[in-house]
Amino acid sequence: MNNTIFSLTDLYCLQLAENKIRFYEREIQKLKDDEDLKNRAEELREAETALEGLRKTRHDLESQRKKLEDEISLKNEKIKKNEQKLSSGTITSSKEIISLNEEIESIKKINTELENNMLEIMIKIDDIDEEIKAQKEKKEKIEAYVKKLSDEIDEKIAAEEKVLNKYKDKKQEVASRIPEAQTDKFNEVAEKRGGVAIGILKEKLCLACNMEMSMMEAMNMSSDDLIYRCPNCKRMLIRYRPEIDRINEEYNE
């Protein structure tokens, strides 16, 4: 604690600073918990998962197509070799010639089936490419919205944090003037009374709980130099003075 003279209104300033700090901390948390951003972020994750699934499906189809293509190529090589044997004139056995021709026709028939299968797969690939394109556009649209919203929220959070830090500095500055015993009492009451430790007594009204006390009770709280206790809410009380209006304005900027 420094050597600055302590005033009872410092306790009220401390209360206002803490009120503001709690308020801005809640506002910042609300921004961080923005439902629209959460929902859109979830949409983005779902869109990314869907896109990843489509790309995996395409990869699997492409693998199947390549496998068929390789198989067809091998069988075409087999056909080519058999046809070369037939045209070479080295085979004179009619039985072997018939066998080679039958094998060629059998391979060609298998290749036709394989080519039809490959064509079906290629059609599926074309279709899924269109789905991938549409899903990518959808994902990018959501992504752009999420980024825009996130940037806006970050900007608001930065502005709120700037004000929050201002009130934290105010709290630190005013707390440095308050004696430790008063700070301990303030914290004790605040803990029991929902964070509000002190109020202002204006005429018969406690501005902390908005309850009026009796005229006699109010008359017994006549000194500006003492801390009283509200008979209703049990909070610390100091009497109203014109300085309070200036303090309220300062903490409502």
Image: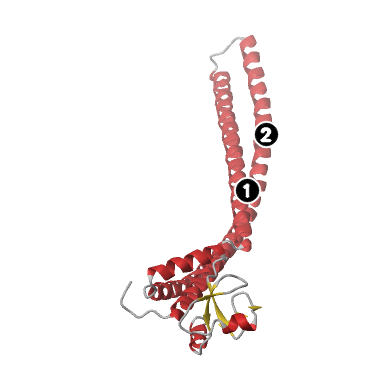
Q: How is the image coloured?
A: secondary structure
Q: Is residue 244 above or below residue 165?
A: below
Q: Quadrant of residue 208?
A: bottom right
Q: Nearer the viewer, residue 239 or 52?
A: 239
Task: Name the outermost residue toward the left.
Answer: 3
Q: Where does the image place residue 121, in percent across and percent down from the top left?
A: 65, 39
Which class describes the residues within 10 Å of circle 1: few (<14), some (14-19), or many (20+)? some
Q: Is residue 156 visible?
A: no
Tell me the amino acid under the disc marked 2. Asn
81 above or below 246?
above
Q: Position of residue 26 (x, y in %)?
A: 55, 66
**Residue 153, picture quadrant:** bottom right
Q: Tell which of 61 and 171 is nearer to you.
A: 171
* Quadrant of residue 234 within the rendered picture: bottom right
What residue is drawn where x is 67% and y is 42%?
Answer: 124
Residue 76 x %, y %: 58, 28
Reading the image, the residue beneath label 1 is 50
Q: Nearer the viewer, residue 110 or 181?
A: 181
Q: Residue at x 33, y 79 (%)?
A: 4
Helix, strand or loop for disc 2: helix
Q: CA distance from mark 2 to mark 1?
A: 26 Å
- Mark before the other along the chain sequence, 2 or 1: 1
Mark 2, residue position: 117
Q: Is residue 14 visible?
A: yes
Q: Going by the image, does 102 lie left or right of 90?
A: right
**How far across and how far down the image is residue 11, in percent?**
46, 76
Which of these two is toward me, 228 or 99?
A: 228
Instruction: State yes or no: discs 2 and 1 in contact (Cβ < 8 Å).
Output: no
Secondary structure at numbered mark 1: helix
The three-letter amino acid code for the residue at tag 1 is Ala
Q: Residues within 10 Å of mark 2 (few under 14, many from 20)?
A: some
